[in-house]
Image: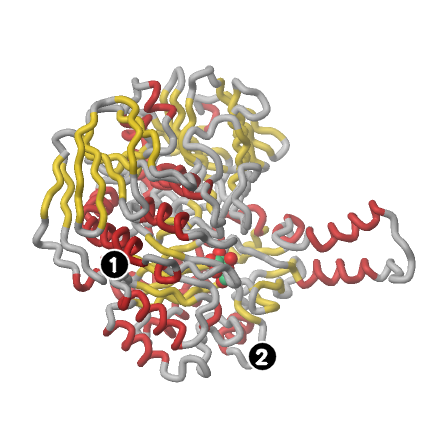
Amino acid sequence: MITKYRLGQPFNTEAVVEELENHPFSDFPLENTTAENKTTVKFHLDNDDIIFGLGETVRGINKRGWIYESWCSDETTHTEDKRSLYGAHNFIVVRGAKLFGLFVDYPGKVVWDLGYTATDEAVISFDDVNADFYYITGENERDIVKQFRKIIGKSYIPPFWAFGYQQSCWGYTTEQDFINVRDNHRKNNLPLDCIYMDIDYLDHFKDFTVNTDNFPDFKGFVDDMKSHNIHLIPIIDAGVKKEEGYSVYEEGHKKGYFCKNADGTDFDCGVWPGVVGMPDFLNKEAKEWFGRQYKFLTDMGIDGFWNDMNEPALFYSVKGLKKALNSLKEYDADKEIGIWEYFRLKDIFNGLPNSIEDYSSFYHNVDGKMVCHKDVHNLYGTFMTNSAGEYFEKEFGKEKILMFSRASYIGMHRKSGIWFGDNFSWWSHILLNLKMLPSVNMCGFLYCGADLGGFNNHCTRDLLLRWLQLGVFTPLMRNHRALGTKAQEAYSFENTEDFADVLSVRYRLIPYIYSTFRRCSQEDDMMFRPLAFDYPEDKLAIETEDQLMLGEECMIAPIYEQNKNGRYVYLPEDMTFVKLSGEKVTTEKLSKGIHYVQVALNEVPLFIKKGKQIPLCKPALSTAELDTENLEYIKG
Ligand code: GLC
């Protein structure tokens, strides 16, 4: 059962689509205080209580013992000391003396102190007295999640081909770069469906342009790639380059579609293109206008996008940079400065990106009312992505255009997927990837995945193979890396056959992954679940956070450590241990308990429950060539 409690007059975040009766906040069942523009909600935690949720965050599946902040952040290092990543997903399920779910529908910063300050207490707070709270009770965790998912609406379903393998790299610049990626995959029997275009395809990083020196006939190029069963997927950044003669900027500026300073002038800031205007996606007209701009690319045959830098990421604001540069005038290059003065000087510039001072200094025009960005920060990327999603659905219908975004708030899951942003080529990030999956599923984000192989740093052959062995199961299976990092396309490493073996397994599993995905979208279900959801009485299962339940049929347990030929795995019931490699399938019945299982670098491990079965098709080099009719089954 869901009860909605309304506090004050909340901003309409569009997260919830079902109309529920508003109950007064005075009836809210958890201890709370509202005073001086601050709301606090508290509940007691017993030793064994568990908190699930919060979507895209660092640390464990059980969120207890850390402090998180829902604040969409351009966070470049996903280490465990961080409190925020790109998404703001204010939903938790608490298993304690009482079992309940809680969604805090508030678009500014929400602090979740989950047993961090006091071990036995959870404290949720934000600096406002306007919000909606949804308190959910149910039979079990999964039931609570389903009820929540029902009120936030069905999860986005991308086109079928978006379940194929995808290659990306910041740095592919010319037509030839893309052709090489395509041909090297095909030549080495490596399946591939999409190649991503990062900011380098643009004319001076301007949204809705193409560098015509590098792509003299872009439409022809897109078509040619499609004839090879490859979809090109361009990036769209939030900021619009401020440049005279650039029609998107000129029109946006003339119509007042950019966010404003308090004095009514455009808020200018620096991102990849240099100085940009930030489209005011919370202004209905501006939102629709931005959505229509995607037509420039869909007219040329493009049918997939990734929206980036939409937390929004600000490298600096023009006014902030000016202030910083002015403060330099106090210094004399020929005079020595003290060490603390040196650090102060350094901080002036370190503090420029994504500063709260900047976020507090610009405004949105919401139905004619000026709303400070800080108070609605977490909606920016979502409203950007929904601007496109709404346009696509109107023009092309559902399930036609692939789209995912970096920043998100609950509600965006109806129009788009997410990717987990700029991770590192670290073994620990395989595990982080795995732990985020059930949490984001709880919040409606089903189409999701991490940069396989890692975005920052240099990836090694074994790391990529092991990471792909998890990626084989994630709806978005994309290998992406940063400019200047070591090549990480599957064909860049020795013995490409091993990669072909692993990628072929993905294609063999697509009928299963796709049908599970669709069912989870239609039934408001999770594709990935913590073992704790399925085996609530099993103490070992509850504490196992490096394995996940997938669909109704199986469990996954990838290897995430270097120089390991296997791993310990906990089976909460009897299961069949399956190893898939190319067209090879080996099975072994294992009984409930702990086992050490060997998995070679070219094998994908999977555990099927007793009495369940998984369909497999023949592998193919693209989804277009996949025969999804003739299936064989592996039985558990
Ligand atoms: C951001 C994105 C990354 C992209 C880069 C350049 O860091 O998260 O995926 O490659 O910008 O556009």
Q: Residue at x 57, y 54 (%)?
A: 370
Using the rendered image of the protein, determine whether residue 158 is visible from the camera's viewpoint.
Answer: no
Amino acid beneath label 1: Pro
Name the amino acid type tagged 2.
Answer: Glu
Residue 317 in picture, x, y percent from top left = 65, 60
Q: Which mark is residue 159?
A: 1
Q: Nearer the viewer, mark 2 or mark 1?
A: 1
The N terminus, quarter of image: top left
Q: Residue furthest right?
A: 335
Horizontal arrangement in the rendering, residue 269 relative to residue 442 (left or right):
right
Task: Please give the name of the residue rendered at 58% of the width and 72% of the height, measured from the top-left corner.
Answer: 242
Q: Residue 367: image x %, image y %?
A: 49, 56
Residue 626, can we see it? yes
Q: Provide the secondary structure element on which disc 1 rests.
A: loop
Where on the picture, by quarter, is residue 105?
Answer: top left
For residue 160, above or below residue 472: below
Q: Secondary structure at mark 2?
A: loop
Determine whether 350 is above or below 173 in the image.
above
Q: Is residue 127 left or right of residue 393?
A: right
Residue at the left extreme, as displayed: 630
- Position of 224 with respect to 128 (left or right) is left
Crowding at mark 2 (Cα within 10 Å: few <14, some 14-19, many 20+): few
Identified at 33% across, 59% down, the residue is 166
Q: Are marks 2 and 1 in contact (CB under 8 Å)?
A: no
Q: On the image, which quarter does residue 536 sit in?
A: top left
Residue beneath label 2, please?
244
Give the spatial CA distance, label 2 vs label 1.
38 Å
Report the side of 582 relative to 206 (left or right): left
Residue for point 14% across, 45% down = 615
